[in-house]
Image: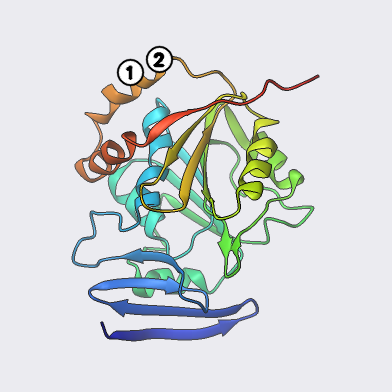
């Protein structure tokens, strides 16, 4: 199938390319892996299944009013959440050129009153979130080489910004299981050792979900009831991803 290159530019970190093929517009970082994608004729559907899995923390939290995001990409998730929730979205990415690209090709309104964007290196030792507090933090941090390993100081800064009942949802790529194990250990050091995981069917993505308290059956029952009150596009995404959700048992922390 033929494709059209809608934009191709380079910044200090490499190539940024926007490609349209078969009605889908996708962002690439100089290789074949799509970092973001949407279909403009189907704006209410999240194209990537792992995007749909990343909406699960919003169902599992009773009031996700403040959402922090590491990894803007094309702004597809930010746009979707602004349109189908009342949450404020606070997104950070390394590459400042992604802001205009998200506006030109992916429908993100950078001036939306509930959106704040920041561009910074989250792996820097002195990095701190630009939001004060968050109820949910979504992490989707990839570059042209794959999943970015966050330093312990970055994870600690994120945890410090999270409300007491807050949740973290983390997209990981299972092509290197040792890296996934390392990430799970890193986050389990700050949260309850029993997490939740959604394995995306027929993909190598999994979304890990953490919080400080242990999960109870009643928490999942409450989340299912909340699904009925969400906007239909969000409810559709969460209902599909709910089928992938399962417990992820860990080892208790040693003191």
Q: Quadrant of the C terminus?
A: top right
- Residue 126 left/right relative to 90: right
Q: What's the residue at 32%, 72% (across, down)?
A: 25
Q: Position of residue 233 (x, y in %)?
A: 23, 46
**Image position of 159 (left or right of 7):** right
Residue 174 percent across, percent down from the top left: 53, 51
Question: Which secondary structure lies at badge 1?
Answer: helix
- Residue 73, compared with residue 204, is above or below; it is below
Q: Dot 2 corresponds to which residue?
A: 217
Which of the 4 image quarters holds residue 41?
Answer: bottom left
The residue pinned by badge 1 equals: 221
The answer to whether residue 227 is above or below residue 173 is above
Mark 1 vs 2: CB contact within 8 A: yes
The answer to which of 112 and 197 lies nearer the viewer is: 197
Per the model, the C-alpha gap separating discs 1 and 2 is 6 Å
Residue 115 is tagged as none
């Amino acid at each position: 199938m033929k494709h059209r290159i809608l934009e191709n530019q380079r910044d200090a970190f490499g190539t940024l390319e926007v490609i349209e093929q078969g009605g889908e517009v996708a962002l690439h970082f100089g290789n074949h892996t799509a970092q973001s994608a949407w279909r403009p004729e189907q704006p209410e559907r999240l194209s990537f299944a792992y995007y749909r899995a990343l909406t699960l923390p919003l169902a599992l939290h009773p009031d996700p009013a403040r959402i922090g995001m590491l990894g803007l990409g094309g702004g597809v998730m930010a746009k979707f959440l602004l349109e189908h929730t009342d949450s404020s979205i606070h997104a950070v990415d390394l590459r400042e050129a992604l802001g205009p690209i998200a506006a030109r090709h992916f429908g993100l309104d950078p001036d939306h009153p509930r959106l704040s964007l920041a561009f910074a290196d989250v792996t820097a030792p002195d990095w701190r979130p630009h939001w004060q507090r968050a109820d949910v933090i979504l992490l989707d941090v990839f570059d042209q080489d794959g999943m970015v390993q966050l330093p312990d100081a970055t994870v600690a800064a994120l945890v410090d910004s999270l409300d007491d009942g807050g949740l973290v949802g983390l997209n990981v790529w299972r092509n290197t299981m040792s890296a996934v194990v390392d990430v799970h250990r890193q986050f389990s050091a700050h949260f309850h050792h029993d997490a939740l995981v959604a394995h995306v069917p027929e993909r190598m993505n999994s979304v890990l979900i953490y919080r400080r308290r242990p999960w109870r059956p009643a928490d999942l029952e409450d989340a299912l009831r909340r699904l009925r009150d969400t906007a239909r596009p969000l409810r559709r995404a969460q209902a599909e991803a709910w089928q992938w959700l399962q417990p992820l048992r860990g080892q208790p922390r040693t003191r």
